Image (spheres, helix red, strand yellow):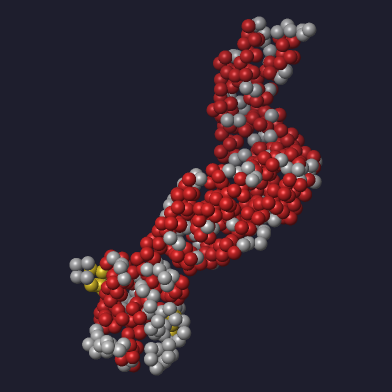
Amino acid sequence: MASVFFPIPTIHRSFESSTPIPINRFSLSQPRSLLPLDSCPFRSRFHFSPTSSRFIPLASTSSDVPPDDSLHSLEEARLAVSEYLQRLGVSEEESVSIASNSPRFLKMLVDGVRELDETSMWISWSSEGERPVGDGFGFKEKVALMAREKGDNGKVAFLESAGMNLSSAMNVARYLSGEMLPSLIYKVKYMKELFFSGSGDGKFIGKSARRMMTNLSIPPDDDVQQTLSFFEKIEARRGGLDMLSSNEESFRLLLESFPRMLLLSIQSHVKPMVEFLEAIGIPKERMRGIFLSFPPIIFFGTEVLKSRIMTFEKVGIVEMEFGKLLPKYPWITSNCIQGNLKQIVSFFELEKVPNASITDAIRSWPLILGSSASKLELMVDSFDELGVRSKKLGQVIATSPQLLLQRPQEFLQVVSYLEEIGFDKESVGRILARCPEIFATSVEKTLRRKLEFLISIGVSKTHLPRAIRKYPELLVSDPDRTLFPRIRYLRQRGLSKRDIAFMVGRFSPLLGYSIEEVLKPKLDFLVNVMEKPIKEVVEYPRYFSYSLEKKITPRFRVLKERNIECNLKDMLGKNDEEFAVMFMGDKGT
């Protein structure tokens, strides 16, 4: 494996200044050299012994273990950093953890001490009136002095221990120069808990983030642009966005991308915001999905969020409904989506779509708000060619608003396939209005396979258009979970495969009925109460479409009282007036 190289940083006395320090005083005369990463000390070679307050080297047979004096120096350096952090207000346990998990920072200090030893430049570090650094100072004291002179007050070591590389830790620490280390440690722990703890729904969060990226077709504002840059960094790592909520690397990239969040007050800003989100119905375990999908939302505060919610109240979405909407699409709180909301509503109003349908579409699939009106218009024009407009268009977008985000070519593939199997444009339009989700499916993976299934159970090709026209939902029904169980149940009740195929060909909604709520009680009534053979439903499968309580039972009682025998079609196929004339002797007036 190729070695990874990193530079030995030049020693700077002042961390806050980015101006190079004169070479005759604090910097090294030698150029910055590159050393292989595998030559630097590894955190795994030590553990801290609380009984002896020492870092004990672990046993190792690796050939790259440093000599004993290097191990001793490293142990001393770790103790020096740990004690230095404790003087800054960090607990002993926390300081030990930080010192043990910041190897590159530690190496920078150790290398700096050794180079100053070799060049005898410690005298330049002595201030007037102080004892010269080189006079009786031990190695550990020099490391502690080097750490203090960095000027970051322990932040670089802590940020490296939190997962950052040394360069990023130094950059972020400079941004957080005003923060005290104990406060910073508390904030990082709180933010990590807020963003990364919870149920194992990481892949769902990643999938949602990818969908948000894909369906954005309006210019992003600064907050959304920052989020997109963050997503791109995650996507470039192994596992991509699927690892968005379950990777230490993601937390590092989050802090690097949004270091400003560590300047926020937990007590006066972040916690009140969490409480507000809970108040509008968002469980705490779902908040991480919101924060990870749109990190800038944490900067808004409760008053800004309330103002963003008011924008949606104008289209009929109240505060508690917003609590259901926000986890679906956190970007709805961004300026660019808020502005586009007005454009989308105006577009549909011009298309004479009822306001209730517009609101239902937004509730169901808020991602349409990330699409430009011109892009939506392409799909609306495709619907219009099939006769679907105004109220019918409202029905489609209220039921399947995701269709609006399809490419017109994908939509037209489904239209062409339905025309191939015998439907004209008018019929395709009726199917679209009745079951729009069909047009979001794949021809090869879904529609063709469903037709093959219907043929396999005995439905003839000539009867297929009729079956689909009567019950287009067949094309989006799951064979294993919906269709096969119903066929199996009917076979168990004594109907043959041929009987079932004949019934489906004549009345395709049959395979959409619940076994427990429809098929079983109505067959039981037919056989046990009406005492009719089960084969009667073969000739009249529409029997299952009538209400048992409101129509089948009352009409059966009327016939029984009059000792009238008739088939199911005569009993149920007539309206109330025709039934009364035929069986109750009511000739009218």
Q: From the viewer's perspective, tell me whether residue 174 is left or right of residue 226.
A: left
Query: Residue 139: percent from the left, percent from the top?
Result: 26, 83
Q: Residue at x 72, y 18 (%)?
A: 575
* In this picture, residue 142 sits left or right of residue 9: left
Q: Residue 404 vs residue 205: left or right?
A: right
The answer to whether residue 255 is above or below residue 570 is: below
Residue 436 lies, with reference to residue 30, above or below; the image says above
Please provide percent x and percent y for residue 254: 48, 64
Visible residue check, residue 451: no
The image quadrant that residue 511 belongs to is: top right
The N terminus is located in which quarter?
bottom left
Residue, far front: 129
Residue at x-position 77% and y-position 8%: 588
Q: Quadrant of the C terminus?
A: top right
Q: Nearer the viewer, residue 303 or 156?
A: 303
Residue 283's spot in the image, x, y percent? 46, 47
Q: Residue at 60% across / 36% down in the picture?
A: 483
Q: Position of residue 84 (x, y in %)?
A: 29, 74
Note whether residue 509 is visible.
yes
Which of 423 and 14 lies nearest the eye of the viewer? 14
Q: How many marks?
A: 0
**Residue displayed at 27% across by 87% down:** 130
On the image, which quarter does residue 209 sit in? bottom right
